[in-house]
Amino acid sequence: NEPAMATLHWLRQGAKLDYVEVEYAEIMDEVAEEERVGQASWSEFLSGFALRLLAVGVAAQFLQQLCGINAFMYYGPAMFKMAGLDGFTIQVVLSSVNFIMTIPAVVLVDRCGRKGLLRWTGFLMSVFMILLGVVGITSVQIPSECPDGTKTDCAHSANQPFGSVSWSTSVQIVVSGLLFVGSFAAGWGPVVWVFCAEIFPLKYRSKGVGVTTSASWLGTFIVAQITTLLMESCEYGTFIFYGTFCVACVMFAMWIPETAGVPMEEIQLLFEKKFGIKHKERVFYSFRERLWSDRSAGDGSSAYGSHPDLQRMQRAGAADGFASYQGP
């Protein structure tokens, strides 16, 4: 397949020729192996190594929803009305920030890696979500009854009349909300979709992406149902609740392996080490050992060449212990 070989040479500019040729042979062997074994049955997909991969993908999609982003998107007007703000205007601003901050994610997802973006944006989401909740709990009073409307209509600052929230409190709440949405859009919003699309071997990919996408919609449904109940009973404590899931997002991002710059044929090796089990024999173990264990060529120059994709592959392998990893 000359076009495929030419494309791989172009992608790996700066890499040594023999490594590119071995990688090409590895890809072709993987394709042939996937064609030989065919599509996985549901019973095979929902067992063993594939089931563990599915659990990782489903967890990522659930956390993407339970961090609270759709609570903002669905109930933003009511939430910000508790701060004495025009909910509709703030909602338009939030949606605009959500769109604009997706652009840096597109640029950084390969440069900074999936793991790095998810970890740092998850940390920022935790800070701003919890800060929003703390400010609301300590600075906004919501009466149990309101003579002129709902409880949110009568929310007020201490020593202020119903419906009057101090300017400083409103600014803190708006800024925290905008920074949370911006952090989500730069990381957990788009990157989770990239991550879930690349962790499954070709044999399981269609089923894996389908189930994880369904998990995302299920998480959306759960958030839509519980947010109104939380706002009614916990008020600004709702943000603390979602903030705990933001912390879980950080923990999840710290656990997953880095997949940026790693060929799709190699990604399951990263998860084999994480899970401590071996999925099946692979035809490219010898190449993986050369790529991650043989750190320098005979002439002293880098075996990875100068291409940044191959350098990221080396760093990812070293960070996950592949220098000495021979399979579980």
Image (cartoon, rainbow, N blue to C red):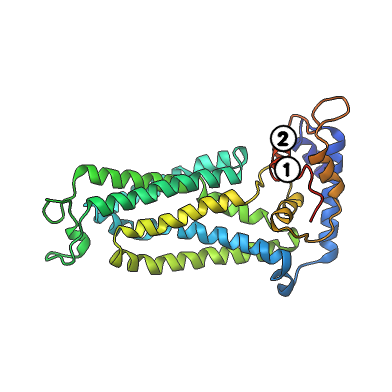
Question: Residue 317 has which mark?
Answer: 1
Residue 37 is left or right of residue 231, and the answer is right
Q: Where 298 falls versus 39 (above or below)? A: above
Question: Crowding near pointer 1: few (<14 within 10 Å), some, many (20+)?
Answer: many
In the image, is residue 289 above or below residue 195?
above
Measuring from the top left, give residue 300's x and y in whole percent: 84, 25
Q: In the rendered image, which quarter is residue 6 located in? A: top right
What residue is at 73 percent from the left and 32 percent from the top?
307
Q: Nearer the viewer, residue 200 or 56?
A: 56
Q: Residue at x 63, y 62 (%)?
A: 209
How far is mark 1 from mark 2, CA to CA?
Answer: 10 Å
Q: Kindly identify which numbered label has been placed on residue 311.
A: 2
Left/right placement of residue 119 relative to residue 35 reads left
Query: x, y (%) of residue 53?
Result: 67, 61
Nearest to the observer: residue 82 or residue 17 = 82
Residue displayed at 51% across by 58% down: 63
Which element carries disc 2, helix, strand or loop?
A: helix
Q: Nearer the viewer, residue 1 or 24?
A: 24
